[in-house]
Image (cartoon, coloured by chain):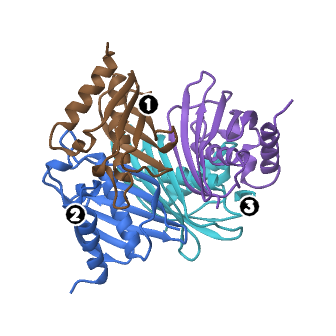
Chain colours: A cyan, B purple, C brown, D blue
Amino acid sequence: MASNTMKMLRKFIEFTTQNKGFDRVCDKIIPVAGTPGKCKFSLKVDEGHLNTGGTLHGGLTATLVDSLTTAAIMTAGGSPGVSVDLNVTYMKAVKEGETISINAEVLKLGKRLAFTTCDISNENGILIAQGRHTKFVG
Amino acid sequence: MASNTMKMLRKFIEFTTQNKGFDRVCDKIIPVAGTPGKCKFSLKVDEGHLNTGGTLHGGLTATLVDSLTTAAIMTAGGSPGVSVDLNVTYMKAVKEGETISINAEVLKLGKRLAFTTCDISNENGILIAQGRHTKFVG
Amino acid sequence: MASNTMKMLRKFIEFTTQNKGFDRVCDKIIPVAGTPGKCKFSLKVDEGHLNTGGTLHGGLTATLVDSLTTAAIMTAGGSPGVSVDLNVTYMKAVKEGETISINAEVLKLGKRLAFTTCDISNENGILIAQGRHTKFVG
Amino acid sequence: MASNTMKMLRKFIEFTTQNKGFDRVCDKIIPVAGTPGKCKFSLKVDEGHLNTGGTLHGGLTATLVDSLTTAAIMTAGGSPGVSVDLNVTYMKAVKEGETISINAEVLKLGKRLAFTTCDISNENGILIAQGRHTKFVG
C-alpha cells in the first residue's frame, strides 16, 4: 500500500510534468520512496537529458535539485515557495542508459525559509552530484 | 559585419540546440553582443520556460548560467570542459512574455580551471538572478 | 568632507572590531569609498591573515565577504539581519604585504531578504575572489 | 589507543593553530573522532567566536568548513591543495557557551579535485549550518 508521501510524490511529478512548462523535462522521473521531508527518486538517463558531450547535462542536474527538493518540502507540509539560493557540485559524469538515484531531503522547514539538500548517485552508489536549495516559503 | 565572437555564439546556439539533447531547451536564445569572454544573449520567456506557478523556472535559469558561461569560455579560447561548481541566487520572478538579458562573463581562464559569472536581468534592467560557474577545462 | 556613507563605514569597522568578538580579525580594514549600497574597502595582508601555506586564508576571505556585504546592506538602509547563504569562489592566491580591494555591493534590498555580491582584487586589479551573500533582514 | 586518523587530526589542529596566522581562530577545536576522509570535531563557542549580535560569527562558520574539510582531505591521503569553491547555508544561531559538532567528510578525492561537505550541529543534534568545499589538489 502506498504511503501518503508516495501518493503525494506521484501526484507532484504528474501535476508538474503533464503540461507545456519547463518541468516537462522531468517527466521520466519515478518516485521510489518517501517519508515526510525525505524523498527518493530514480531517472534513467536518455538522449533528451544529455549535453553535446553525451553525458547528463548540468542544467538538468540543477533542475532535478530545484524541483525534487521542492517536492520534499511539500511532503514535509511546506508550500512550494520561491527559490532563493541553489548550488550544485558536479563530481562525476553520467552516460545515456545509466539510472541515477536522486535523494532530496529537507534540512529545516522554518516559517519563512526552507533549507534542503540533494544527493544524486549512479547505479553503483557513487555520488555524481550534490546540491543545496534554499527557498522562501513564508 | 558580425564579429568573430558573434559568429561563434550563433554557431554555439545552433550546434547545441539543434539536436535531441537537453540543450534544446535553449533553442530560443539569441546572441546579442560579444567580445572574447564577455557575451550577451536575450530570451523571450514563453510557456515552455515556466514553472507551475507561471514564472521562469529556476531550473532553466540554472541551465542558462551553465550553458551560456560555457559559450563565454569558448569565445575566450577555452575548451567547454566539465562543470565543477555552479550556484544561482534568485532575486525576482519573470513572467511569460518578458524578455530577459543574460550576460555571461569569464572571470579567469586558467590552465585547469575556468571561472565565470552570469547576470540575468529583465527589460527594465532589474537583476533577476545572478550565478557563478566553475569548470574544469584542463 | 566625508560622506554619510563613509562615516557609517568607519563607524561600522570601529564598532564591530573594537571588542573581543570574531570581527576583531577585520580590524585592519580601511573604508575607501562608499555610496549607499556600494562600498569599497582595502586591507594590507599581514601575518595574521595567512594560512599555513603563507597566503591569504580562505576563511578570512569568506569573513570579508560576510562582514563587508553586511556593511553595504546597512549603508543602503537595511538591518544587518542574519546570514542565509554565502558562497565564495577563489581564483588567485595573495601573499603577505599585498594590499587587496574589497568591493561589496547590494544587488537587491527587499523587505525580507537582502542579496549582495563582493569582488576582491589585488593591487593590479586582478580578481582574486568573488562571493555572494544572502541575508534575512525581515 | 588513538587511531592514526585521530593522531593526524590532533597534529593538524596543533600545527595550523600554534602560529600567528589566521588559523589561530581555530585553536579551541577538539578532534573527536575520525576515519580516513570522515572527521568529527567539537568547539565550545566563546566570546572570541561571536558576531556583534552575540551569536556564532558566520565568518568563523565558513572558516570551520574551510579548515576542517581540508583536514578531512589530508586524512584521506590528499594534499591540502587550494580552495576553489566554498559555500555555507546558515540555518540556526548558536550562542556563547554552546558546544557545536563539526562533521567534515570527503565526498570524492580525485587526482585534481577534492570535493567535501561539512555539517555543523548544536548539542541537541540540530543542524545549524551546512557547507561544501571544492579544492584543487592536483
The crowd level at tag 2 (other Cα within 10 Å; few <14, some 14-19, many 20+) is: few
Alpha-carbon span between mark 3 and mark 1: 37 Å
At a point 30% along the width and 36% down the height, the residue shown is C29
On screen, residue A135 versus residue B61, left or right, reads left
Q: Chain of mark 1?
A: C
Q: Nearer the viewer, mark 1 or mark 2?
A: 2
Question: Could you confirm whether marks 3 and 1 are on the same chain?
Answer: no
Looking at the picture, how far across and down is residue C6, in whole percent? 32, 21
Mark drawn on residue B75 = none
Q: Chain of mark 2?
A: D
Which amino acid type corresponds to the residue marked 1 in the rendered image? Answer: Glu
Q: Which residue is mark 3?
A: A53
Which amino acid type corresponds to the residue marked 2 in the rendered image? Answer: Gln
Q: Residue furthest bottom?
A: D1
The crowd level at tag 3 (other Cα within 10 Å; few <14, some 14-19, many 20+) is: few
Q: Which residue is mark 2?
A: D18
Q: Is residue B74 visible?
A: yes
On screen, residue A118 versus residue C82, left or right, reads right
At a point 31% along the width and 79% down the height, the residue shown is D5
Mark drawn on residue C105 = 1
